[in-house]
Amino acid sequence: MTEYDNNTENKPDGPENNPRGGDRPHRDRQAPGMKFSPWFIILGVVAIYFAASFLFKDKVEELTYSEFRTAVEEERVSDLKIGTTDIQGTLKVTEDDEFEGDENGEVTFRTIVVEDPDLVALLNEKGITYSGKLENTLLMQMLLWLPLFILFGFVWFYLLRRMGRGGADFMSVGRSKAKIYAEDQVSIDFKDVAGVDEAEEELGEVIEYLKNPDKFQRLGGKIPKGILLVGPPGTGKTLLARAVAGEASVPFFSISGSEFVEMFVGVGAARVRDLFNQAQSKAPCIIFIDELDALGKVRGVNVSGGNDEREQTLNQLLVEMDGFDARAGLILMAATNRPEILDPALLRPGRFDRHVLVDRPDKKGRLEILKIHVRELVLSGDVDLDRIAAKTPGFAGADLANIANEAALLAARRGKDAVDGDDFDEAIERVVAGLEKKNRLMNQEEKERVAYHEVGHALVASSLPGTDPVEKISIVPRGIAALGYTLQLPTEDRYLMTRTELTGKLATLLGGRAAEEIVFGEPSTGAHNDLSKAADIARRMVKEYGMSKKLGLVSYDNEPKASMMGMGIESLPDYSDDTSREIDNEIKRIIDEAYKTAEGILSKNRDRMEKMAKRLLDIEVLEDEELKSFLTPAESTGSKK
């Protein structure tokens, strides 16, 4: 698909760059919130102390013993409590005192006990009541503080529930975070998986081993310890792993690679050990590590000079994989979409020694996946799943799930009783090109430029052999930056492309730019995305595919090696500066020739381009039979490089 950009930023338009639903089953995860900290305990104890001091401490005035004797002789004290270290009581305040009393003119006082054998006789003489004071023992102080501790306990329990697992996380920081599903909790099996028949066959041996290990052990065979599921995002690797556990009816341990690594040194390794200990106690079972590349990146020199927690975690995983006995029925599965950055030690025989490709489905696979995702939808009679599968080449299972969901939402928004074919067509366009922006207003000159730009793409595509047929032309803005787009859909799945097909694709991408220059005499920024894609194709033709006669059958692909990437060292070109200059010249030559091809086609079909652009300006969308009447036959220059 080609589109007209309204700025100079690169705006991807493929389904892999759009939001989508996923094939993988829903996993309940803890809602993000506060994390437990030991400081909470310290702050709580301090708060209780100050609260108790504030709540239970009465206002007490300190008197010297001489002042106390004087007050006794003046009969201004009462209710004395005499202890071993101090005397407390009530004092009537006079004008000579430095402190104020309450509404009764009294205040509580305290003084230090001194050796005074005449005190009791003086108190009896003045008729002052007194008694001994029971000293506060530790037990009594605890009883006094008990209500506050109970209150704090309730508050603490409430906070822990609000924080999630709070204290449990802190006290069990080395415990594995794997989600454990018992054999009766894994409700997914191979009937819920489609489009990956070869992967299912590969994994069928694992299921047979878990169900009947004696069949393999009696001949001395050993099942692979580790199985690595490799494939693009959204192809259903996680779903496939759960389906294996469901078919075998064994417990399933599921964890992400990123959940092993924490900021505390040694935590990741402890979690790996705990995970394998739990799994061995429940064998036969399956351990599944999603996004293995987050944990298993190639080891190298730590440029920061610090301790690398991730490497320690990976080392522990390698040790555990060597240590467990596959005969116990413990199978380790993992998934990644970046196998090239994994440490070679993970991939050697005896560890992840079986690699299962979970690729994007072909047309038959897409059809089977669609049948699964429309089970719960109410479909009208005009929905042709075979046609939808044909219109979605390159879509992964997650993309197809997103299309089915978008179609259902569109039908509900429009008040329909069932999801029809138009809803699916609109859903495909929404996934590919983005949301329609009918309220984005363009001036007339911009609309004309966009119309000629999109017509240029369509005319060039219909004139060259091997290009995908044009299904629709629109100047209705979509997505973030697309002011218009030309939708091309392949008629079949393709795995190889010839040089003629690649140059035709280049000419199609440059057709919009050529149309602008022919009609308006100067280009605009709208071809930015087209130029970026064209440069990428031409660069691959020269550097990877050996399609330059001048440079010959040599691949100059300079991808960083896995052993270097782990060290943080950038890959340097392994060819000379002169060769680099020749590569740049060849890329420019291929693009220039493709542009001349597009320009020649549009010049010879100028009248057709004018008619199409005017019609497109009137109705904004060209499709179906009307589009075909304009495009067939378009005259080609016959110039193909």
Image (cartoon, grey):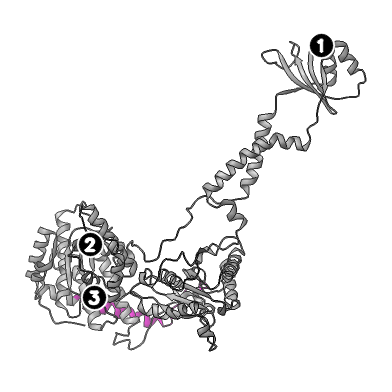
Secondary structure, mark 1, is: loop
Vertical comparison of 426 with 150: above or below: below
Q: Amino acid at mark 2?
A: Leu
**How far apart in space, not on screen, are marks 2 and 1 (Cα)?**
100 Å
Task: Based on the picture, tell me whether residue 195 belongs to the magenta stretch.
Answer: no
Secondary structure, mark 3, is: helix
Name which residue lies at 12% across and 78% down.
636
Question: Which residue was labeled with disc 3?
Answer: 506
Local packing at callout 3 (Cα closer than 10 Å; few below 14, some 14-19, many 20+) is many
Task: Based on the picture, tell me whether residue 579 belongs to the magenta stretch.
Answer: yes
Q: Nearer the viewer, residue 544 or 403?
A: 403
Q: CB of mark 2 within 8 Å of CB of mark 1?
A: no
- Quarter of the image containing the C terminus? bottom left
On the picture, is 430 further left or further right than 621? Answer: right
Q: Main secondary structure of the magenta part?
A: helix
Q: Which label number is shown at residue 75?
A: 1
**How far apart in space, not on screen, are marks 3 and 2 (Cα)?**
39 Å
Question: Which residue was labeled with disc 2?
Answer: 379
On the picture, is 85 further left or further right than 326? Answer: right
Q: Nearer the viewer, mark 2 or mark 1?
A: 2
Asked whether residue 270 is in view, the answer is: yes
| Sequence-first tag of 3 and 2 | 2
Vertical comparison of 574 with 442: above or below: below
Q: Amino acid at mark 1?
A: Glu
